[in-house]
Amino acid sequence: MKPDKHLLLLFAALILSAVSQHFYVGQYRREMRTDQTASRELAQKQAGAYLQSLSETQPIHEEHDKDGHEDDHVASHTHSADKTHDHTEECEHDHEHEHHLTADATGTISACSSRTCSDGHHKHDHTCRHKHAAASDTAKVVKPVALDVSGVPGNQLEIGKKPPASMPFSLCTNPNCKSHEHADHDHENGHDAHEHAHSHDHASQDPSITPGFVLLLRELGFAQLAANLLWIQMDADSHRGLWHRVEVALELIPALDPTFIDAYLLRSFLLDEYMKKHDEALQILENAVKQVPNRIELWQQIGIFCLNHSGRHGPKRRLERALEAFNMMFRFYDPPPQTTRLIAVTLTAMERREEAIAILQKSADAADRPPDQQQIDREMIGRIRSGEKF
Amino acid sequence: MFSRIRLIMWDTFLDVARHKMLVVHLVFVCIAIGLFNLFGHFSTTPSLEYRMIQDVGLSIISLFGFLIALFIGSTTLRDDIQRKTIYAILTLPMGRWELYTGKFLGTLLAAVVNVLIMLGILTGLLYIKFGIIWAGFQWVALFMLLEFAIMTGMVLLFSLTNSLIVCFSLSIFCVLLGNMAEHVKHLAFEADIPLLSFATDVVYWLVPNFGYFNIKYKILKDLAVSPSFAMWAIGYAGCYLFFLLVAGSWALNKKDL
């Protein structure tokens, strides 16, 4: 019986495709540096650890209630480098920020952005007045804050001090959201004397993304789409006070898309700022930087965490690591202008003042340095020379 | 031989372009433009807004690409059979394999052009809004094209079945399986049933592993693709397309026409 040539060719083609698949898969794993079994086991371990930690920890609401914040200013406006405040009316209270590093001088190397800091360092003085309008206006009134953490989602959120139990804080990222506006009130009576109009209409929208849907998307090859949808869901959940879901979403997003740095940053921010799990927050950033070493925001945030000025990020200071992280920022193209000062502050905290001054001096003398940055550098040199503790 | 194949290929491509492509593009453009405003909600973090538009835009292209592959692949040859125009072609002095190869290349070309246009639209809009051009655009385009080329070839092969429902079902099943191949293999291995493991292995080598082509997000975020890796990918896709082509030609040869 004569064999069918077509059929033989078909078998040959099948074998050829199987062989090429074998080699391609091998090359793929080398290129991606992935060991399927190992990564699967790691994912299982992480999932197990996460479930265990869930059963051990208290709900976020309870932890938050214990914090005993003083201020009723539950602001959930979004800030960016361009739009610092979304108040449209005159908000007549002066934010006398006691920034961790700004102290009483020029605020040149604040480790926390004035727009975002929400811890006990802020004191609102309702007798003075200024208008929140735009970043440029704010910069004139509030002392210049050199560290721009606008790329850090957690730092873009002005988060209230003493939020209601049902909504400890809001993560609204909508610049056009009008529902956060203050009700008309006399600021002289303080914020305790009135109710803020913070009614969200987000609650009426319920973009429920079920785990099954996320899983389906992931299996169809749309893991990134699933991660983005989860982020949108998380945003909506935060408005509705569903913090358990926010936590799960922030845990899931990096599992779907390890490059989604906003999820790492926001989760570490929440853990650090509200749950006071400082070590865990730092660990998240350290894990993130292993996954995505090419994002400057992560290095900056690690540096700030480790520098830990004024003990905002827990009792420990890891100055060596902070210095390492800030130095990493210099490896990036066009690092932010405050990088030099961050390094100098870290060195000063390590009592290596001469080195810090030398670095700042070199930076201040650089011809390509903008004049305002040179000025801030010189002021910082003065502060270091004065023996100020950082 | 080549001129005949080229003729059929070009005719197939023009036929597809005349009927379906422009409408799909229009829909995609509308969605893409809508996307740019939709994520204005996250505009306070430009990097977040950018990545959302980019990710969702690419996902839509993938989805549309699959749908285009499904509709083009399932109708081109099938329409000829249904309308009986294929009989006129078969009377010409040409082999059935030449006809199939022409149709195969024509549908492939249509799918490729479609995806390229959609990628171009998304890239252009991203550039207009953010002033950023994708660094690894050529690699993203390459891997997406390889993925859709295999999908189209597969659908064309399944379109030789008698029922459109069977064609659609098989195509969707294979795409799903192709994306989940690694997981299915792992589950079968864990189940510890030898026969199931063997069957899964056979399917694993038969079905194209789309998961290994779906690396566009990695390319855009943190992966530098080496040319040798790209060559391996092209090699695998080429071999699989050859297998699909031979299988389709064989099936058309055996078909009672």
Image (tube, coloured by chain):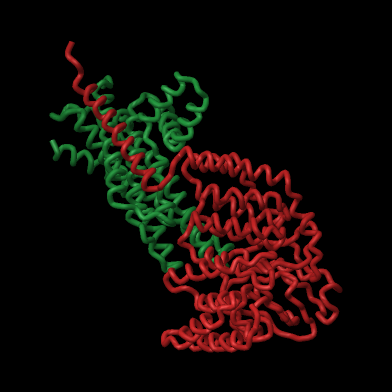
**Residue A294 lies in quadrant:** bottom left
Observer able to see residue A19? yes
On screen, residue A162 above or below B10: below
* B68 displayed left or right of A196: left
Question: What quarter of the picture does the C terminus of chain A occupy?
Answer: bottom right
Residue visible at 57% across and 66% down in the picture: A301
Q: Which of A180 and B114 is in front in this view?
A: A180
Q: Colour of chain A?
A: red
Q: For the N terminus of chain A, which image quadrant?
A: top left
Q: Quadrant of residue A278?
A: bottom right
- The residue sitting at 52% across, 65% down in the picture is A299
- Residue at screen point 58% across, 69% down: A319
Picture coordinates of residue A226, whole percent (x, y): 54, 48
Chain that appears green: B
A142 vs A283: above or below: below
Q: Position of residue B95 (x, y in %)?
A: 17, 28
Of all residues, the one furthest to the top in this rendering is A1
Q: Which of the two residues, B36 or A338, is positioned nearer the viewer here?
A: A338
Q: Name the spot of residue A384 as percent of width and height, x first.
A: 59, 84
| Residue occupying the point 73% across, 74% down | A121
Is residue B46 something one can see in this rendering? no
Is A13 displayed left or right of A236 in the figure? left
| Residue A367 as seen in the image, left or right of residue A18 | right
Residue A135 screen position, x and y as percent: 60, 79
